Amino acid sequence: MEPNATQTSENRPAGPVIGAVIIILILVVGALYFWGAKLNKEANQTPEDILNAEDQTLNELQTQGTSDEVVDINTDLNATVLDGLDADLQSIDKELAK
């Protein structure tokens, strides 16, 4: 009998395939490890942390004068900086959207 020249099943060693799968799994686990470490580095602030943090804008607003003279009121208005207020509101919206 002749050996069949068109055999469909070949006996290949499984070592290279298993080695490639192990290397891919090690790379995936390493990537997940570094990704998790990056996420843990980001500070997750609790509402208590936010409330207890010092607010520079609030401190500046609380230093306003109590006089009812027009000159003093104008001085307080000119000293009040509300330019960053909109940016603060946008950052709050981003945090709430998470």
Image (cartoon, rainbow, N blue to C red):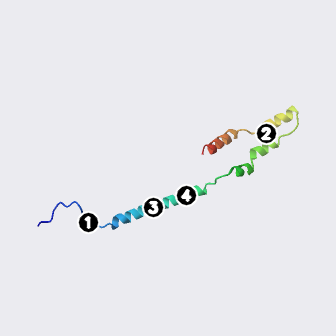
Label annotation for residue 36: 4
Q: Nearer the viewer, residue 35 or 80?
A: 35
Furthest toward the left, the residue is 1
Label annotation for residue 49: none
Furthest toward the top, the residue is 70
Q: Earlier in the sequence, mark 2 or mark 3?
A: 3
Q: Earlier in the sequence, mark 4 or mark 2?
A: 4
x, y percentage for residue 22?
Answer: 41, 64
Q: CA distance from mark 4 to mark 2?
A: 45 Å
| 17 lies above or below 84 | below
- Mark 2 lies on residue: 79
Mark 3 or mark 1, whichever is nearer to me: 1
What's the residue type where badge 1 is placed?
A: Asn
Q: Earlier in the sequence, mark 1 or mark 2?
A: 1
Q: In the picture, which quadrant includes the N terminus?
A: bottom left
Q: Do the residues bearing badges 1 and 2 touch, measured as CB atoms within 8 Å? A: no
- Mark 1 lies on residue: 11
Mark 4 Cα within 10 Å, few/some/many (few <14, many 20+)?
Answer: few
Q: CA distance from mark 1 to mark 2?
A: 84 Å
